[in-house]
Each structure stands twice: as C-alpha cells, then as structure tokens.
C-alpha cells in the first residue's frame, strides 16, 4: 500500500488578486506502516497538503495515486478513498454532530453500508482503542472535554478501518497531560494496528519522540524529508523558516562543540542520556 503524490500543485483563487500558490510541485510517498510527521510554520502549506491526501481538495495540477490508481481518474470512487484515508481535523467540533458519542462514531460505518449492529460493533471497538469506555456512549459529544472530543473524532475515523490516519494538529489547545495522552494513544494505535499515520504538528519534541520520518514544509514546498536525526541536523535552516529543533538537539550540539564525543543526531531525552553516558564512559542504567 502507498499513497503517492506526483508534481502536485494547488492554487487558491487562481486568476484573481487573491491568488496564492499554496503547494508547489509536491512529490512524496506515504508507505504502508509509516509514522510520518508533517511540520511547518503557519502558512507553509501543510494543512492544504493533508486535505489532498483523501481527495477533500483537488490539486490544480499533478496526480495522486492510491494503491497505484489515480484518484483523479474517471469513475474513481472518492467516497471509498475517504474511508481508506481517514482525516481528523484540527478542531473536533467540525466532525462531531450526532446526539451522542456512540451514534457519532457509528456514522462512518453506517455510511459505508453496514447495518446498525455491525456499525455499533466497529464503533465500540474504535472507542476502546481511543480510551473512551461505555460511560461515554450516550453522552453528547459537545459535553466532552477537549481531549475527549479529539478521542471521539479519532474513533469516528478509526471505525471505518482506514489504512492511513491523517491527524491535523490533534493536540492543539490541550494541556501537556492531555497532549501526551492523545499522542501516546496514537502511537499505540500505530504499533498495534500497523496503520500508516500522518501527524501534523508544530511541536518538534512531539515529532522527535513519536515519528520515524519528518516532512518539513516551507512556502508550499518540501524543504526536508528524512528521519528525525537527519532533519534536525539542519536546525539552523529550520530556524530561518520559523521552526526550531528539539531542545535536545541544541544541547547535544553544544556538548559536541565542547569536545564531548556525543551523538549530535540524538533527538529524544533517552537517546541523549545514553549517548552522554557512553561518552563519559559510564555504564548505561537499567530501565
């Protein structure tokens, strides 16, 4: 399975005074089982890009292939694509509208043609995966906390059993505890279900901790596309486009400049700890 973009361009309000070239010659591929972080400054094009992944927005130029099929081809089933490539918006209120949580999560499977009983079975399994138990089934989704609304929105997409889950800033506005809970749950889903994840985030620490690949957007173009350690080596270039590397990156480079033989490509606290202990000749502690 793969989702492949070839020379994708997108222009808002073409031919007017408000014309904006939001995406410029985007070529990339999301492969089966990947956990990808998509980062960029506000206005970099990342939200526009993810809306192309399930056909919500159509490219001005270029092609997008899912399982080798051009999604812009004549007769292509766009409805089925949107059940295979699930998109969770930044604000869950945009996706929650039913009278209770269970009905809301059932909406996608019912729209796929499943019976009420089949839809409820998938909805309940999805709610378990996102940490919402039976006590939430008959609550109004609008009475949930911010973190719970995000869990419900994610469950609504998971109930359709997508192959790719795209999350646009799923932790926006949450406190640190809520942010960690959501991201830990997403990471667990990736490990257990082996689905591909595309995570849009502003937090360098978050993407460094969870993802295996980072795509950096800048002014509608892909600036970097690599594993976290390699991307954050370009921390000075990231700063020039309004981003920053994790604090660990700056610390490790500073230690390297001081003469300590550490791995400056370490991106998490755990990696930094191990590298520093090794450089100091100390035994790695048992964990």
Image (spheres, rainbow, N blue to C red):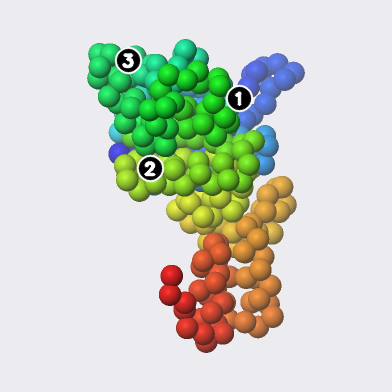
Residue, disc 1: 11
Please name which of the two marks, 1 or 2, marks the residue nearer to the observer.
Answer: 2
For the residues carrying marks 3 and 1, which lies nearer the camera in this image?
A: 3
Q: Looking at the image, which residue sits at the far right? A: 17
Residue 280 visible in image: yes
- Between 14 and 215, which is closer to the camera in this rendering? 215
Badge 3 or badge 1: first in the primary sequence: 1
Which residue matches tag 2?
189
Sequence order check: which comes first, mark 1 or mark 2? 1
Local crowd size for mark 3, using a 10 Å CA cut-off: few (<14), some (14–19), many (≥20):
some
N-term-proximal mark, 3 vs 2 = 3
Which of the two residues, 195 or 118, is positioned nearer the viewer here?
A: 118
How far apart, in angstroms, are the residues tagged by discs 1 and 2? 35 Å
Q: Which mark is drawn over residue 110?
A: 3
User: Label 3, label 2: how many angstroms apart (C-alpha)?
Assistant: 22 Å
Indicate the secondary structure of the residue bearing disc 1.
strand
Q: Quadrant of the C terminus?
A: bottom left
Which residue is drawn at the image coordinates 55% and 34% (left, top)?
147
Relative vertical location of residue 144 with respect to residue 4 in this rendering, above or below:
above
């Amino acid at each position: 399975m793969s989702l492949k973009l070839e020379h994708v361009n997108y222009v808002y309000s073409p031919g007017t005074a408000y014309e904006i070239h939001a995406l410029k010659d985007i070529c990339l591929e999301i492969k089966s089982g990947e956990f990808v972080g998509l980062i960029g400054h506000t206005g970099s094009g990342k939200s526009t890009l993810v809306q192309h992944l399930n056909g919500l927005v159509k490219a001005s130029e270029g092609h997008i292939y899912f399982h080798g099929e051009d999604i812009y081809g004549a007769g292509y089933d766009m409805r089925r694509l949107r059940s295979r490539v699930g998109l969770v918006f930044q604000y869950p209120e945009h996706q929650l509208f039913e009278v209770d949580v269970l009905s809301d999560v059932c909406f996608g499977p019912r729209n796929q043609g499943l019976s009420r009983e089949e839809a409820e079975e998938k909805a309940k399994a999805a709610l378990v995966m996102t940490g919402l138990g039976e006590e939430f089934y008959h609550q109004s989704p609008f009475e949930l906390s911010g973190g719970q609304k995000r869990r419900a929105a994610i469950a609504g997409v998971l109930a359709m059993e997508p192959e790719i889950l795209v999350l646009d800033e799923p932790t926006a506005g949450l406190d640190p505890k809520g942010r960690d809970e959501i991201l830990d749950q997403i990471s667990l889903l990736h490990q257990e279900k082996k689905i591909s994840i595309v995570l849009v985030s502003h937090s360098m620490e978050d993407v460094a901790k969870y993802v295996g690949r980072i795509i950096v957007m800048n002014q509608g173009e892909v600036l970097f596309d690599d594993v976290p350690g390699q991307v954050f080596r370009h921390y000075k270039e990231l700063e020039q486009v309004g981003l920053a590397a994790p604090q660990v990156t700056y610390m490790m480079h500073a230690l390297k400049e001081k003469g300590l033989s550490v791995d400056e490509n370490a991106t998490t606290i755990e990696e930094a700890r191990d590298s520093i202990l090794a450089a100091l000749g100390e035994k790695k502690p048992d964990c």
